[in-house]
Image (cartoon, rainbow, N blue to C red):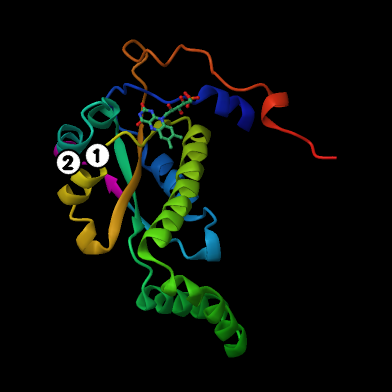
Amino acid sequence: MNLTEKLNWRYASKMMNATPIDNQKLENILEAIRLAPTSFGLQPFTVFIVKNQETKEAIFNAAAPGQPQIPTCSHLLIFAAYRKITAQILDDYFELINKTRELPQEKLEAFHDHINGLVTKSDETNFVWASHQAYIALGFGLVAAANEAVDSVPIEGFNHAILDKLLKLEEQNLGSVCLLALGNRDEEKDYNAKLPKVRKPKEKLFVELP
Ligand SMILES: Cc1cc2nc3c(=O)[nH]c(=O)nc-3n(C[C@H](O)[C@H](O)[C@H](O)COP(=O)(O)O)c2cc1C
């Protein structure tokens, strides 16, 4: 299958069959998430991986009872964005750039000045911005899952405050943004599995400007 065929194969699975996915496939999906681009390259989020069945069930029962994919998936990924962009976060990032690229000091300082403005913005603004970056990584994860023939579903329909409390995210300067359940579809019980895709026609979505 080429990429377009794989993207037609993927769909938002509503029920999985509780079988595990191959470890190498999971690693490839995680690597795509790690390689996703982010604004300034800051990657202002953490992705938690939940394999433990009790933890998946605790999340389902407390924060997302309308999402039967959670207890039936193989792995649940939780994308959590930084609540605050602190000077320490930026310093750590510069250290990483310096270690990786060995940029001349003046270039590093210019970049530092450029992104330092983030620290002076409000935490609310930065959290929304950080959440946008997490969504891009979610998209990379979705495409990578399709590429690996792993079923998936992005999930926003959960109680963020309850999940944050359950996982003590605020204490870690994090707030939950979205989830990605990975697993294998339940062909019989998943009513979404056989439905045709609903998408706008090309002419409605893309507009060429003169
Ligand atoms: C950001 C995001 C959040 C979503 N949240 C949920 C969700 O909470 N529960 C769910 O069953 N599907 C969720 N979906 C799946 C969409 O409903 C689905 O992708 C859309 O209807 C298109 O169908 P398809 O993915 O099967 O092609 C979400 C999708 C996205 C991109």
Q: Residue at x 48, y 35 (%)?
A: 148
Residue at x-position 56% and y-position 28%? 7
As helix, strand or loop, the secondary structure at mark 1 comes to loop
Which residue has dot 1 on it? 159
Task: Classify 208 as above or below 102.
Answer: above
Please tell me which residue lies in front, 59 or 187: 59
- Is residue 2 something that shows in the picture? no
Q: Which three-letter amino acid code belongs to the residue tagged 2?
A: Thr
State ligand 1's quadrant.
top left
Q: Please, which residue is most extreme toward the bottom here?
A: 105
Q: Residue at x 24, y 63 (%)?
A: 172
Q: Return the mark for residue 144.
A: none
**Label 2 belongs to which residue?**
55
**What span is in magenta?**
48-55
Residue 166 in the image: state x and y as whole percent.
16, 48
User: Taking 173 as reference, is 197 above or below it?
Assistant: above
**Does the magenta portion include 50?**
yes
Q: Position of residue 126 (x, y in %)?
A: 42, 62
